[in-house]
Amino acid sequence: MANHPRLLVSCTSALVDEAIDVRVSGCRPREAVTLTARIDDARRGRWRAQAGFVTDATGVVDLRSARPVAGNYATADSLGLMWSLELDDASSPTSGIGSLSEPLTLELALEVDGRRVDRVELQRRFLALGMRRISVRDDGLVGTFFAPSDQRARAGVLVIGGSDGGLSEGTAALLASRGFAVLAVAYFRAEHLPTELIEIPLEYFEKGIRWLASQPGVRPDGLGVVGRSRGGELALLLAATFQNLRAVVGYVPSGLIHAGIGSSSAPGAAPRSAWTHQGRPLPFLPPPAIGPSAPSASVADSPLELTPMFLRSLENRAAVEAAGIPVERICGPVLLISGEDDRLWPSPVLAEIAVARLARCKHPYPVTHLRYSAAGHMIGPIGLPATVSTVLHPLRGRALALGGMPAGNAAAAFDSWPRVIGFLHSSLESVA
C-alpha cells in the first residue's frame, strides 16, 4: 500500500505562548519518523531541535500524546520542539531570542528514512494582531509601548530587564497580547542612557510610570511592574518607593539591593550602588572580599557560577540589614518566581528575604513565592527555548552559568506564565 507522509499543523501563525497541534499522518504503521525544528534569524541566531517517533497503528504521530524515542526532549509535549531548541555553537546572535517583538519564523520538517518528505513554516508571534507598538522617547525615556488598538481602559504594566541592559520587548509584547497596556523600558546600555549598571536614578523610572499612567486607555489606578533578575530587585524597589504601583512580579529577584556592575572599574576600586534616589546612592550589599572560596576567574573557558559569591556576601549581616528593600511599603500583592538550581545568583534565598520581611511586617496583601526545583535563572514565558545554560555577560565580560535543566526550565515556564497573567489581571483590575 502506498503511503503519503504529511506534516499537519492546526495553524501556521500563533503567539509564542500558544500551543500548535502538530501531527504526522500518511505513514506506515510503526514506522520511524523524525521531526526537526529550525529557526534561522539574522539577529536571534540559528536554533535547532530534533525528535524521533514511531507512528501508531494507523501511521500517525500526534505530538500532544506521542512520546519521542530519541531527540532533544523526552515526554509528550505539543511545544516540545519549541522549548528544546538549542543554539548553534557557530551562531553569534546580537539579541536574545525573546528580546525582540518581531515574529519568529520556525520551520518544521518531516523526515522518513533519512529523506525530507514534508515541511511547514510557522510564525511564532509575540504581538497579537490588532495591537499597537509605539516607540517612546519622551522626557529622556528609552522604551516601547504595546497596547490593544481599541483604547479600552486597561491595567498598565511596566516591564524592566536585568543586568544585560538594553531594551527587551518580547515579554512586554506578550503581556500586551494578553490584555494589558505595557511599557518596556531600558535603563542602561541603550542609546543615550548610561553604559553601566551604576547609580541609576529611580526618578528615571518614575518618569516611565507617569508616562504610562497618562496614556489613553490606561487606568492610572491599575499599574503594576514586572522585572527580571536585577530588574526583579528593581521591581520590588520601585513598588516600595512609588506607591501607585499596585502589583509586583519578580522573576528570579532579590529582596536586597546589590552593588552596581561596571565594565571599566579600576582594579580594587570600591563598589558603588546600582541605584540612587533623590540624588543619594542607596545602601547596598557589597560583594565579599576575594578569598580562597571565591569563584576563580582564571579558567577563562569555564562558565563562572556566581551563586557561591552571593551566598558568601549574605554572611555580612550588618550589610544585609542595611541593604534590605522596604517591601512592606508596597501597596499591593507580590508574586516572586525563582529556580532552585539558579547558579547566577541564589534567587530562592534572595526572594525569600523579601517574603520573610513582608510576613514579619504583616503585609496586608497576598504574597506568593513560586520555587521550581529543576529550573535555573532563565524562567520565562511558555514556548521559548529553555536550553540556555550560560550567557556571555556584556559588563562582566565572562561566560556565566545560569543553571537549570531544559525540561525543568520549560516546566517552570509552563506553570508560572499563566499564573503571572492571572495574577496581574486579578491584582490590577480589581483595584478600586
Image (cartoon, helix red, strand yellow):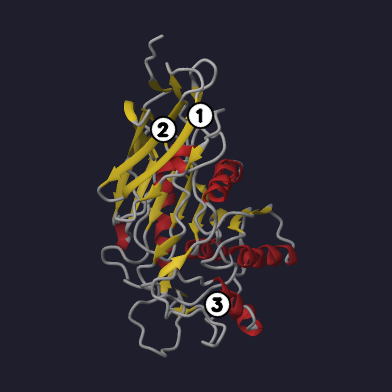
Tell me the residue at 38%/36% (across/down).
36
Q: Which residue is mark 1?
A: 63
Q: Amino acid at mark 3?
A: Met
Quadrant for residue 85, please give it.
top left
Query: Which image quadrant: the C terminus?
Result: top right
Q: Which residue is mark 2?
A: 35
- Whole-Å distance between the Cαs marked 3 and 2? 42 Å
Mark 3 or 2: the one toward you: 2
Where residue 96 sits: x, y (%)?
Answer: 36, 54
Compare marks 3 and 2 and give the one earlier in the sequence: 2
Mark 2 or 1: the one toward you: 2
Tell me the residue at 38%/11% (across/down).
2
Mark 2 and mark 1 residues within 8 Å of each other at the beta carbon = yes
Density class for disc 1 (Cα within 10 Å; few <14, some 14-19, many ≥20) is many
Mark 3 and mark 2 residues within 8 Å of each other at the beta carbon = no
The image's mark for residue 309 is 3
Left or right: 382 in relation to 197: right
- Whole-Å distance between the Cαs marked 3 and 1? 42 Å
Density class for disc 3 (Cα within 10 Å; few <14, some 14-19, many ≥20) is some
Q: Amino acid at mark 2?
A: Leu
Tell me the residue at 33%/60% (across/down).
141
Q: Look at the numbered disc 1 and give the secondary structure of its residue.
A: loop
- Whole-Å distance between the Cαs marked 2 and 1? 10 Å
Where residue 365 sits: x, y (%)?
Answer: 68, 54
